[in-house]
Image (tube, rainbow, N blue to C red):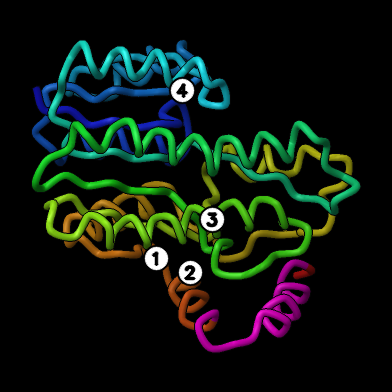
Amino acid sequence: MNIGIVTGASSGLGREFVRQLSRQETLDEIWVIARREERLHALEAQVETPLRRIPLDLTKQASFRTLDGLLKETQPNVRILINAAGFGKIGAWKDLTLEDCDGMIDLNCRAAVDMTQLVLPYMGKGGRVLEICSTAGFQPLPYLGVYAASKSFLYRYSRALRVELLGSGVSVTAVCPYWVKDTEFISKAKKTRNSSYVRHFPLASSEEAVVRHALADAKLRLAVSTPGLVCTVHRVAAKFVPSELMMGAWALVRRI
């Protein structure tokens, strides 16, 4: 059985990945993983590919034991894995709770690695892994510090894993978008004691464009997908400009 697996499938980029996968890929099932099962029910009406709803909280270790059991029982051929679950919080260190910090690290880092480790044995030649990182991973970002660090971790992990898998026929693409305007990410990121450090989100992309670009780049088996002009320029600049200057530029941009 050929399947795709998408985490964070109840909203935002994860949900849009499911929609576009259903149109573009010939799959027997898409396994959709998220906490909010009612949203996964709603998603079924929007796609033609059969969905297997797997309501799991990926910040809980028990969720991975459940998923491990499903994989062993089903023995699927996973054609594509998309780790889209994640969140960020805007604020200074004093504005974030321990729950905020631990949640970002758990979901953005550990959960993505654990998912990848569990699923890779079920992927064969032609398989694709998309790790949804962020342009935030290209540099330190004060007032988005934990989030940016978590995405830097995922970006570096993705780049290293890609090399480890050379010759296996499985590719890994680090997807690094800029702000996405039509998801819940920004509204959730602002729910802290003080999120005024980032005033506006200019030139934000749409989820449809980000996902379309990311899937096209993954088909080309690119190491990194920067789905938009801003994140592409950011990626190039971060290779040459010292971090201190990049943080200075961020201090100006976040006040726009």
| Distance of label 4 from label 1 (alpha carbons) | 25 Å
Which of the labelled discs sits on residue 29, or is there none? none
Label 1 sits on what residue type? Thr
State the residue position of label 4: 34
Mark positioned earlier in the residue sequence (2 or 1): 1
Residue for point 87% across, 45% down: 95
State the residue position of label 3: 153
x and y percent of residue 125 in the render?
A: 9, 46
SS state under label 2: helix
Asked if residue 31 is among those painted magenta in the image, a careful observer would answer no
Label 4 sits on what residue type? Ala
SS state under label 3: helix
x and y percent of residue 17 in the render?
A: 32, 39
Mark positioned earlier in the residue sequence (3 or 2): 3
When the figure is inspected, residue 106 is found, relative to residue 238, above or below; the finding is above
Mark positioned earlier in the residue sequence (2 or 4): 4
Closer to us: mark 3 or mark 1? 3
Residue for point 82% across, 42% down: 96
Residue for point 55% across, 42% down: 108
Closer to us: mark 3 or mark 2? 3
